[in-house]
Image (cartoon, rainbow, N blue to C red):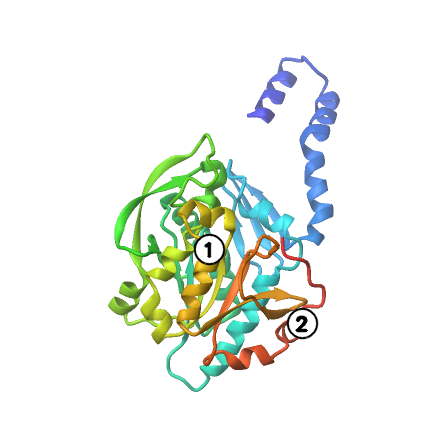
Amino acid sequence: MLLQQERTRLSERKMLKTDISRELYGKYYFTLFEFARDLKNSNVSEISIKDGSVVIRTRKEGVLLNCPEGDTTSALGQLILAGTENIEQEMMTVLLREILKGKEGNSSKAVFFDIGANIGWYSLYFDKLFNDLQIFAFEPVPATYEQFLKNMVLNQSGSIKVNNFGFADLNATVDFYVSPSLLAASSLADTYQTPDKVKVKGEIRRLDDYCQENGIQPDFIKCDVEGAELLVFKGAKKTLSEARPLVMTELLRKWSKCFNYHPNDVIGLFKEKNYSCFLIANGRLQPCESVTDATVETNFFFLHNEKHKQFLEIDLLKTAGVTDIPPQK
């Protein structure tokens, strides 16, 4: 639309072509070169502007991600701001690799649950990285789910099982608070209270029911559901007891407060299942007995005290080849 206006100005002889070009460069084109100079400091290696769309390619594994117009939480901004290393992703990669080693010689594949999959970044990344990993992704918000499917097509990935529902402590159709400008922040609670939010119907299920109905036992669960994490794990108690999956989950005090609980309630639930909580400090998993006002970390790992004991004896990040470890945001 903006460029069309400039074409009109030129056709009507209101400005010289050189003057319009200079103005456009200062307003718009210059930004393209700013991105080109700074991409080396991010996990984005390429930004493609195509007819009606913007697509990025990640530096690691070359994952292609569509960037919806108007969504300020799109992969474009998130991955550029995150820098070249994602410490949680690196830790997850090494842990998954160790889980896969334990599956060698076993006829069944390791199973990864991506709960709160959003547009599919983690699922698509691990799908490219591991051929022998079975990935199940869960995204209840229809608009976000559709973006995930678009990214599946972009990456020619047909092996991920993508489900248009989420998990909680009951089976129901519920309202999600969705903001088109903050699509990744969609939640069962009105966490951001943005003026453009709308209520969108979505399905939630109990993880225990899903696993039992489909005969699936996850080996690794990643959970990021904008404050509803405790609800997910309340509906997964049987799976935690029987399958004893390794878990990485986001826990923020400000979001859990919207659901009337504290992150320590999640730690307590896992403790009842013989799990211990860990955070990443100095490149290693370090025990975390509780979350306090001084805790700056927002992503936590839960390892079963028997099943995952050997993982704590490994220098995980050294194994992954990570040398420059950024602080958690």
Looking at the image, can residue 156 be seen? no
Quadrant holding the N terminus: top right
Q: Relative to the observer, which residue lies in front, 230 or 320? A: 230
**211 left or right of 265 in image:** left
Whole-percent x, y for residue 185 in the image? 47, 44
Q: Nearer the viewer, residue 107 or 168?
A: 168
Q: Is residue 301 left or right of residue 199?
A: right
Q: Identify which residue is drawn at 59% across, 45% down.
A: 77
Identify the amino acid type marked 2: Gly
Q: Residue at x 48, y 59 (%)?
A: 264
Residue at figure coordinates x 46%, y 55% from the top left: 224
Tell me the kind of residue under disc 1. Answer: Asp
Badge 2 density bin: few <14, some 14–19, many ≥20, Cα 10 Å: few
Classify 27 as above or below 118.
above
Query: In the image shown, does 25 or 180 lie closer to the viewer?
Result: 180
Residue 137 higher or lower than 109, as above or below: above
Q: Look at the image and tell me whether residue 305 can be seen.
A: yes
For the residues carrying marks 2 and 1, which lies nearer the camera in this image?
A: 1
Q: Nearer the viewer, residue 234 or 226?
A: 234
Q: Position of residue 144 (x, y in %)?
A: 42, 46
For disc 1, the marked residue is: 224
Q: Few, some or many C-alpha atoms within 10 Å of disc 1 (few <14, some 14-19, many ≥20)?
A: some
Image coords of residue 80 (percent x, y): 63, 49
Upstream in the sequence, badge 2 or badge 1?
1
In terms of image quadrants, where is residue 45?
Answer: bottom right
Classify mark 1: helix, strand or loop: loop
- 108 with respect to 30 (left or right): left
Q: Which mark is residue 321?
A: 2
Q: Secondary structure at mark 2?
A: loop
Q: Residue at x 65, y 18 (%)?
A: 10
- Residue 239, picture quadrant: bottom left
